[in-house]
Amino acid sequence: TIIAKISVDYQAQTKAGETDLPPVVFVVDSWAAALTSSQWDKTGGKDAGKVVGDMGQRAKQLGDVVNSVTHLCAGLPIMVLGIQHIMDNQDGYGRKHKTTGGNKLLYYASGCILLTKKELKLEDVDDKDIKDSYAELDKGMLADVKKAAGGDRRFIGITSTAEIIKSRVSKPFSKIDIQIPYSKGVDPYSGLFALLMQEGIIYKGSPGWF
């Protein structure tokens, strides 16, 4: 409702000749957590406590909302970033994860990036400052405590794999790993080398040389 009100207002101002409308970014966290008015009645309203199977209506509603938002924002300085949860794919073929809510949501969105995560070990970190800080920390640890912590194989963050599922401005199914250490957050250069390799800007000429 909020996105629709602002989009309609922007459309009216654009038709009236306004050309310097400020850009707006909406972040929906998440589509799965949104409730319709009827769902709210079952959650905290007059029909609270009644469990009714939706028979796929939930996925249909989510797809309809994304479809509406895509059309509402077309041609306007409005960007909508929506988060949708993922689950393990029960099909033995294809990628390991898929988005919840069916494929309709993907069809209507302008783009989709699938983010999955795994543990980031100290030995796999690219950032020298982080390695140095843990080396300094290890100096004050007893040998058995250091061993219990896992040494260089301890988990110090996550590695997020970002895969382009759908895009209108880039080739699909490209993927990079982004390191996110707990102590510093996202490394702004993480994944850049892999990206430059994919684009052919950096290439491997012979074993051991780039």
Image: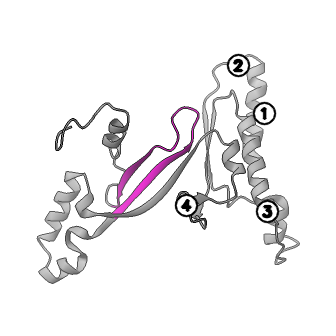
Q: Residue at x 33, y 46 (%)?
A: 190
Per the image, label 3 sits on a secondary structure element best described as loop
Horizontal relation, residue 36 to residue 99: left or right: right
Can you tell which mark lies on residue 8? Answer: 1
Label count reads 4
Q: Are marks 4 and 1 in contact (CB under 8 Å)?
A: no
Residue 41, x across and y down, in percent:
84, 67
Mark 1 and mark 2: Cα distance apart in space: 14 Å
* Amino acid beneath label 2: Glu
* Residue at image mark 4: 97
Of mark 3 and mark 2, the one earlier in the sequence is 2
* Residue at image mark 2: 18
* Amino acid beneath label 4: His
Q: In the image shown, does 96 or 188 lie closer to the viewer?
A: 96
The relative height of residue 187 versus residue 10 in the rendered view (above or below) is below
Q: Residue at x 67, y 55 (%)?
A: 31
Mark 1 and mark 3: Cα distance apart in space: 30 Å
The chosen color scheme is one colour
Mark 2 surroundings within 10 Å by alpha-carbon count, few (fewer than 14), some (14 through 19), many (20 or more): few
The relative height of residue 135 versus residue 69 in the rendered view (above or below) is below
Mark 1 surroundings within 10 Å by alpha-carbon count, few (fewer than 14), some (14 through 19), many (20 or more): few
Q: Residue at x 56, y 61 (%)?
A: 93
Can you tell which mark lies on residue 56? Answer: 3
